[in-house]
Image: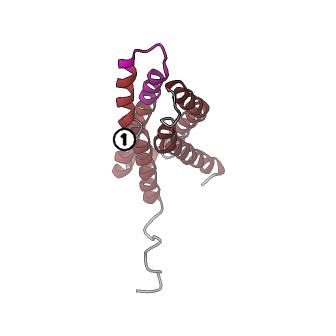
Amino acid sequence: MSVLSTTVRATHLLTNAAWFGGSLMGAVGLNPATREPDTARERREAADTGWNRWGPVQGAAIGLHLLSGLGIVADNRRRVFAHPPTTAAVVLKTATTGAAIASSLAAWKVGETIGDTGASADDRAQARRHISWLQWATPVTTGALLVLDAYLGEQQRGVAGLLDRPMGRR
């Protein structure tokens, strides 16, 4: 395994971890915390500040995640195309990545509506209803990507595993 392959794989995992962790923190911590200020203006400012600071980091993580994913597929192209379980996992991972991107973009768009003082009260109320479930879509899909990465890693390592008996003992 080359240093470049290791770097690309590490980038892929770290950027997914950032994407997963940031979206989970938003759903568990930031979004509920923005309900605590007294006025609607203060609530919007708190949410806007947090998400505007995180947005560029998440955007960079998503971009690097996609690029490193392409690098991994290129590096493992023979296995991806010749080994049916790997092919199926890569197809599923690609679809799940698309769902994670779609959920991230949808949450961003809905969040903009919530923070838009020019939006009608009905539009903002509808956006709050959407974000109540949509905020969980990104951590679920990016968590699924982490599981698929673990599955693909297990396919590469061979027969012996942590819980297998040592070779000398039967």
Which residue is rendered at x = 44% and y = 59% of the image? 154
Query: Can you say whether 168 is above or below 95 in the image?
Result: below
Residue 26 in percent (x, y) is at: 50, 40
- Which one is in front, 22 or 64? 22
- Which one is in front, 32 or 95? 32
Outermost residue toward the top in this view: 118
* Element under disc 1: helix
Mark 1: few/some/many CA within 10 Å (<14, 14-19, 20+): few
Q: Left or right: 71 with respect to 111? A: right
Name the residue that disc number 1 marks. Answer: 91
Q: Per the image, is 83 magenta?
A: no
Image quarter (top left, top right, bottom left or bottom right) of the C terminus: bottom left
- Which one is in front, 105 or 90? 105
Q: Per the image, is 112 magenta?
A: yes
As shown in the figure, which amino acid type bears the numbered disc 1? Val
Residue 165 in percent (x, y) is at: 44, 80
Query: Can you say whether 100 is above or below 10 in the image?
Result: above
Which residue is rendered at x = 61% and y = 32% of the image? 53
Residue 134 in percent (x, y) is at: 38, 34
Query: Can you say whether 149 is above or below 27 in the image?
Result: below
Which residue is rendered at x = 35% and y = 51% of the image? 85
The number of discs equals: 1
Which residues fall within the magenta stretch? 105-123
Residue 123 in percent (x, y) is at: 37, 19
Q: Left or right: 118 with respect to 56? A: left
Query: Can you say whether 89 is above or below 123 in the image?
Result: below
Q: Main secondary structure of the magenta part?
A: helix
